[in-house]
Image (spheres, grey):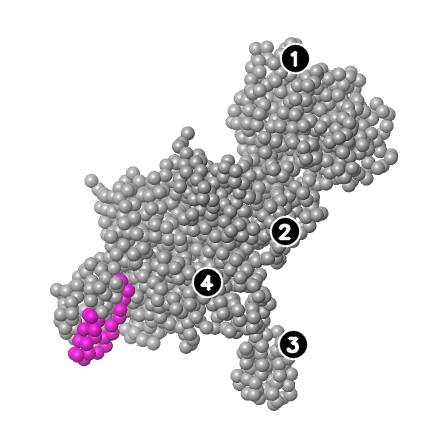
Amino acid sequence: MVTPKDILRKKRAEAVNRIISKGYLSTKRVYVGMATCEIAAGSRDVMEVFRQAIANGLVDVYLSQKGCAGRCNLEPTVEVVEEGKIPVKYGRVTPERAREIVERHLKKGQVIAEWLI
Amino acid sequence: MADLRKDNNVKEVHYKLTLCDGPTCIHNQSKQLHQVLDAEIKNRGVQNVSIHLSGCLGMCKKGPILIVNPGYTMYGNVKAADIPEIVQSHLVEGKPVARLTIIEDHLYNRFFRIFGDVDFFGKQMRITLRNCGIIDPENIDDYLSVRGYEALAKVLTNMKPQDVIAEVKKSGLRGRGGAGFPTGLKWEFTAKAVNGDKYVICNADEGDPGAFMDRGTIEGDPHTVLEGMIIGGYAIGAKKGIVYIRAEYPLAIKRLEKAMDAARQCGFLGKNILGTDFSFDIEIRLGAGAFVCGEETALIHSIEGSRGMPRPRPPFPAVSGLFGKPTLINNVETWANIPVVILDGGDWFSSIGTETSKGTKVFALAGKVRNTGMVEVPMGTTLREIVYDIGGGIPNGKKLKAIQTGGPSGGCLPEQYLDTQIDYESLAKAGSIMGSGGMIVIDEDSCMVGLAKFFIEFTQDESCGKCTPCREGTKRMLEILTRITRGEGRPGDIEKLERLGGMIKKSSLCGLGQSAPNPVLSTIKNFRAEYEEHIHQKKCRAGQCAAMLSYTIGERCVGCGACKRVCPAGAIEGARKEKHVIDAAKCIRCGQCFDVCKFNAVSKA
Amino acid sequence: MAEQITIYINNKEYKVDPGQTIMQAADKLGFHIPRLCYHPKLSIEGACRVCIVEVEGARNYVASCAYPVANGMKIHTNSQELRQARRDIIELILDNHPLDCHVCERDGNCELQRLASSMGIRARHFQGERKVYDKDLSSEAVIRDPEKCILCGRCVRMCSEIQQVHNLTQAHRGFDTVVMPAYDMPMGESVCTACGQCINVCPTAAFLEKNYTQDLFQKLNDPNLIKVVQFAPSVRAAIGEAFGIEPGRNMEGELIAALRKLGFNYVFDTQFSADLTIMEEGSEFLERVQNNGKLPMITSCSSAWMKCLEQFYPDLIENVSTCKSPMSMQGALTKSYFAQKIGVDPKKILSVAAMCCTAKKYEAAREELLVDGMRGVDIVVTTREISWMIKSAGIDLLHIQPEEPDHPLGESSGAGAIFGVTGGVMEAAIRTAYELYTGQTLIDIELESIRGLKGIKEGKIDLDGKEIRVAVAHGLGNACKLLDTVRKDPERYHFIEIMGCPGGCIGGGGQPYAQANSIPLDEGALMKRAQALYDLDRGKTIRRSHDNPDVQKLYKEFLHSPLSKVSHKYLHTHYKAKLPKGIIPKNG
């Protein structure tokens, strides 16, 4: 008999595959905070910068959104998870900073230490 | 994510060691371990290592726990004798000691893998917020990949409704909306009530000024709330759930709707959930932003289409709630805890926290503190830890004056209560409440009378107007506080406030009125001198009550005329390059001269 | 019966029945816990907090009106701290209430005033801002004065629970809370049916009838006018209460004498046209039965009910009798038949009605009821107003020599008298219809099945082998319930009597305020008023409307026959759907 657990297991496997097919296994993953608080702090524009960068040919980057992690005074936040490196989180990201993150961190692999949380 | 340091240059790595500092681990000698570890690191001259103490990590049975980041290597049952090997092999040579590592797959663990290296999160323990800021809330796949809906599948596969209730009871979970009623008992009462249909309600009518825990939870992880509600529906035998959420939360509503659609498509919501006979669906109802609609009977009236006004209890909603049917109402945070309770077990859950309060509590930390934001800590954490270790202390070198917990229904605790543990009973004993989780840090620049006035102004405005003590009484309290802050206080005003406050607390119909006087009564109790100064000496030591300020120009004045130009009342006289003078009779105490003076010549007192 | 439980009140042990509230238990034990928003006929509001008591183990005081007793419960009703809290609560209400007791219409019968006095409130501690509102004078009948309102919510509950009109509600929040019709519509444009029950249950003067006493006094002094007055059956059964006597004494003769002393030239009795109504309505009913007319036929005496029908049940308008109410019939005849008889210009006649009703003020102004462009009734005063006038004119109602009404519109049968009680119109109609239909005399004329205060009553009459099913409802809420049944099952009844007020006219919105030891609309008091009318009926030799000699004379001299053309001109009218703003017609 198929139990609810079996059904769920199958659904999870499908879900993981879908995430992977969207590029989750890229070398770099970028998460932009997109809760009301983050959006109020300007995260939509930041998200747009990363979206544009990918549209303009930035490869091997998986872009996603996330909810509020609680660092209100440092919003908008952007988290970069890089294969084999410590995940880092940038605070008070403006579109200008986002463009820098694209150029320096995502393209050249340099962590911009002074903007880290 | 566990293989983060594959080919990392060791020199670049700054190791962060997190040592569990929960009560059980302390009992298991974690303090001594800390000293040994510290000594060992210094001995071997290892650089780039920092040691952090965390709150309870919830793995008490395997404590003491040591986590090494990056890489999230977890060592359990660590003994002092193991330390040299860990330091040498892991920190110096970069090889984790496989024999001592443990794997614990609690839901919230992922959090540390990502955030364990940030101070802000060190003492936090994230159960409610375990996925917030980690997964994409608009993608059910993300939720599924972090064991989403597994608790539901578990319940539907091999738990009877009474088993679910037993597990919730065992967990010791209490209502996170403020009153702290044991959740399992509430579920049991509702399950036992028989009267046709039953309902499950999620109270997302977050009304405290400055509180945003519910919004954060729903926006960051809507599915966990839905999953909790579905499990609740199964446990009590309801077919219908309602999320009552304020219309001012458009993004949360959108994400909730999206989550519900996705859950329906996946068969987690709707008819025959996960192929079983159990059917349950959820509907969203929007509140119009009335604070009182967070009170459960007022909320029910609002859903029914009536004016949002509370009614006397009993009967409780568990017996006669929505449309007169047995109704289970829990707050967002309570619901979000349910999947964890089911997956990790009531026993595990009840191992976190204090004797009477289990699990964690989310707070919206705000006010005069360096790190403001949403924090989740195990029950039993002290206010000091939240303000200083997590919040980073008071900025600008100011002194802490008080901590206000529980929003407009809560109280102000002065510095001597900093070591109060966060749990329902301790906070109540200290004179405040847990409430829904607002926490405002107040420094010496704030006037306590003004603060009390602010809160009573809020509750007076939000009173539904039904019962006399709340409607009329808070108005009179506000009038008295207003005149005190205007420098028109009279002897006997404090006693009047106490008399009214005590009566309103004991006589009001609902929780709003019963708690409305708390900010006033607790500030009188803890800061009576400030009230007396206002009334008798017409003095506000924080310099906030404008009516009591007087501005004077001192010897530093160079006669630049800047103050004279900005003064809207024409109260400043003085020839160029000569000392200016303020005419106190004309001065309206707007403070513009004070702000504009470049020579600090204007003083206020 | 469940086993009794033990409770302790003020440290004394008592055995009480379970399943009741603390207040109910205490009442039976002789503890009268002070109360304000509580009313036994309405749902529990728990709003005023005056009835709080201390229950050992409870964190806060509990409202005794709402809190159930439990075994072993230890209750304190009178501790020092509790007394102070209760007094403070009443003080807080007073602090937001105009301090104009001595010029207030409710002076002397205001529940708040009595409460403040009995609580011993002699000083004030928390005075501050007070609410300021304009009076709403837009309605012909009911004045709304939010300044006097203490927000007990009785009117709101009365309007929605008992009357199901749902006109009144609380609006705004906190200190700004105010009771008003939906969308703050003026009472005159709202769905208010003018039944006046809000006035009856209001503990203060937040609702009052529109007062015409000064106007009337002035006109009574006008030598050019012929002053004619009629008074409703229920007025005589209740007016004594306004003079401090027990409910249930028929004051008919004293009232007639007092009205003449006030300056009326002719005192007629509305019971006369009650008999006339039976002639017309009974004939109309038989005609509908015989000619397959629209059934069930529904009575049209109650003006609040007529507005309710037009607003909420427009689909049933055809079912309603075309007869005017007795008051309007009497008014129309006063200015026609009577004017001709005494040979004066009807414009010179001042036609006044003393009614137990506030809605009659509204009815008298209805355009549909004008005859030749003239109002049948110029001024309507309530039982309360007429009692004030009597007191004000220095007339000693209680010791006056009783007098008889004038002819030709004063004689009445016992059937006319019982119009004032729920079921009375039906009973009277059956007495006549039976004879008109069967040609035989009905022996057992007291129809117990449709007497009493049950919300909806049903009965059956055998008309020569034809079964006639009748139903009676009093209070608009019961009326709505009954009409919902009719909508679903139109064949169920043949004849329906509806009265807008609880108990019928005896519980009208214009009746004297509850006495100090009583509550508004107390069932015991209502039953006594009813009994006064039933006794009046029993004491008459003429107990059937068609036997009334003045009625017979009227037909001979003026109307010719029931439902004649003349009858239609003076005694019948029509109704039309009224859909005020915001009302969506039920059933399309």
Front: mark 2 or 1: 2
Q: CA distance from mark 2 to mark 3?
A: 38 Å
Q: Which residue is mark 3?
A: B585
The three-letter code of the residue at mark 2 reads His
Do residues under tags 4 and 1 come within 8 Å of each other at their CB atoms? no
The image quarter in which residue B490 lies: bottom right
Q: CA distance from mark 4 to mark 3?
A: 36 Å
Q: Which residue is mark 1?
A: C435
Q: Which mark is residue C97?
A: 2
Front: mark 4 or 3: 4
Position of B346 compared to C414: left or right? left
**The magenta stretch spans residue B36:** yes
Question: Can the viewer see residue B536?
Answer: yes
The three-letter code of the residue at mark 1 reads Glu
Q: Earlier in the sequence, mark 4 or mark 3?
A: 4
Coordinates of residue B459 in the picture (x, y in percent): 51, 57
Q: Chain of mark 2?
A: C
Q: Which residue is mark 4?
A: B522
Q: Secondary structure at mark 4?
A: helix
- Answer few, some or many: residues within 10 Å of disc 2's Cα (few below 14, many 20 plus, some between 14 and 19): many
Q: Chain of mark 4?
A: B
Q: CA distance from mark 2 to mark 4?
A: 31 Å
- Answer few, some or many: residues within 10 Å of disc 4's Cα (few below 14, many 20 plus, some between 14 and 19): many
Q: Residue at x 81, y 24 (%)?
A: C338
Question: Can the viewer see residue A53?
Answer: no
Do residues under tags 3 and 1 come within 8 Å of each other at their CB atoms? no
Q: Earlier in the sequence, mark 2 or mark 1?
A: 2
C498 vs B464: above or below: above
